[in-house]
Image (cartoon, coloured by chain):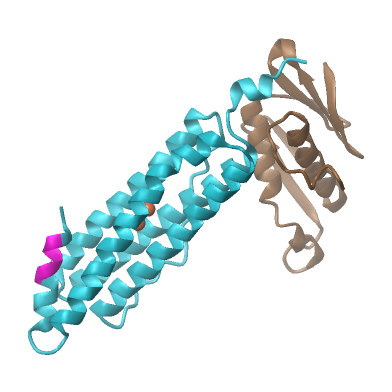
């Protein structure tokens, strides 16, 4: 029997399902950062708003990277439904703490897919995710540095404005 | 045409010379590309079967399934949905695109 399935698709459906889940997660991250940009704009943190607009774009690029990988491997990429976007934050510190929390969640999810791909002997998916593993280290590091800066600067008096100005250092 | 998997109500065939698949739904034989089979898998897997057991969420326990870009429409009851899920699970293992081993031992 000719293996027409393998000829049309080069990854396993389990990897495809996990990657579709990751597409959803990146879309959710993008929408969350857009909500954070909105919060920053409304609360006078204009530089931080710029930072989050850019993050939102980057998360969409991550999503498209995975989407196109599924196209290239002959899979069935699913355009994600994005719901439950939080727009409420108690402070700028809360915004960046939530960002770090979100990035850690994404990192864990990517590591989980790498592990599952490895178990299934799906080398293509495993290698494809190398870029994401490295990207997550950078993303987590950026937010951690911003949180350190917030800690050092302090939120009293002109602290908040200084914090916002310094976020510029993390916008490439 | 080779039989790939047969469930209680349905049969999945592979037609290697046409590079496609067929599912015999009983009253209808449906030709499908692998993409369409993947799309069927997605639809079947996203059916909220637990709603069939809640008369508020799915009063009559039916599911409308549209296949092959709206070319075919099926109305399935709970047992048929479960059987189709079973066909899809085993079918993908049999065509070598699923690494799921627990399915085979069921
Ligand atoms: Fe991302
Ligand atoms: Fe990120």
Judging depth in this view, the residue of A109 and B35 nearest the camera is A109
The picture places residue B13, in percent across and down from the top left corner, at 81, 24
Q: Is residue A83 above or below residue A133?
A: below
Q: Is residue A153 left or right of residue B78?
A: left
Residue at 41%, 64% (x, y): give it. A104
The picture places residue A126, in percent across and down from the top left corner, at 51, 41
Please identify the residue farthest to the top as the structure is shown.
B17
Split into 4 quadrants, where in the image is the N terminus of chain A? Answer: top right
Residue at 77%, 21% (x, y): give it. B14
Residue at 13%, 89% (x, y): give it. A156
Q: Is residue A86 above or below residue A64?
A: below
The picture places residue A56, in percent across and down from the top left corner, at 30, 55
**Chain B is which colour?**
brown
- Quadrant for residue B59, please give it: bottom right
Number of marks in picture = 0
Judging depth in this view, the residue of B80 and A150 nearest the camera is A150
Q: Is residue A17 among the parts visible in the rendering? A: no
Residue at 26%, 81% (x, y): give it. A91
Q: Is residue A167 magenta?
A: yes
Residue span colored magenta = A165-169
Q: Is residue A127 magenta?
A: no
The picture places residue A94, in percent across and down from the top left corner, at 30, 78
Q: Is residue A110 left or right of residue A147?
A: right
Main SS class of the magenta portion in the image: helix
- Quadrant for residue B52, please give it: bottom right
């Amino acid at each position: 029997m000719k293996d027409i399935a393998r000829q049309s698709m080069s990854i396993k459906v389990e990897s495809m399902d996990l990657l579709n889940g990751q597409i959803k997660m990146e879309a959710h991250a993008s929408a969350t950062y857009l909500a954070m940009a909105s919060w920053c704009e409304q609360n006078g943190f204009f530089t931080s708003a710029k930072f989050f607009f850019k993050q939102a774009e980057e998360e969409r690029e991550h999503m498209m990277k995975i989407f196109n990988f599924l196209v290239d491997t002959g899979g069935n990429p699913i355009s994600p439904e994005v719901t439950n976007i939080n727009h409420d934050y108690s402070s700028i510190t809360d915004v960046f703490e939530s960002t770090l929390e979100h990035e850690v969640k994404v990192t864990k999810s990517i590591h989980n897919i790498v592990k599952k791909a490895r178990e299934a002997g799906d080398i293509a998916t495993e290698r494809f995710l190398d870029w994401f593993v490295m990207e997550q280290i950078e993303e987590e590091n950026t937010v951690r540095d911003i949180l350190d800066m917030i800690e050092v600067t302090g939120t009293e008096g002109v602290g908040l404005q200084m914090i916002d100005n310094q976020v510029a250092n993390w916008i490439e | 045409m080779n039989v790939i998997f047969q469930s209680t109500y349905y049969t999945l065939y592979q037609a290697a010379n046409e590079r496609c698949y067929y599912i015999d739904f009983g009253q209808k034989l449906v030709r499908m590309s692998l993409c369409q089979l993947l799309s069927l898998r997605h639809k079947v897997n996203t059916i909220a079967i637990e709603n069939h057991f809640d008369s508020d969420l799915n009063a009559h326990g039916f599911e409308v399934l549209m296949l092959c870009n709206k070319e075919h429409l099926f109305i399935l009851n709970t047992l048929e949905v479960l059987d189709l899920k079973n066909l899809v699970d085993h079918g993908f293992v049999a065509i070598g695109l699923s690494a799921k081993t627990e399915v085979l031992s069921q």
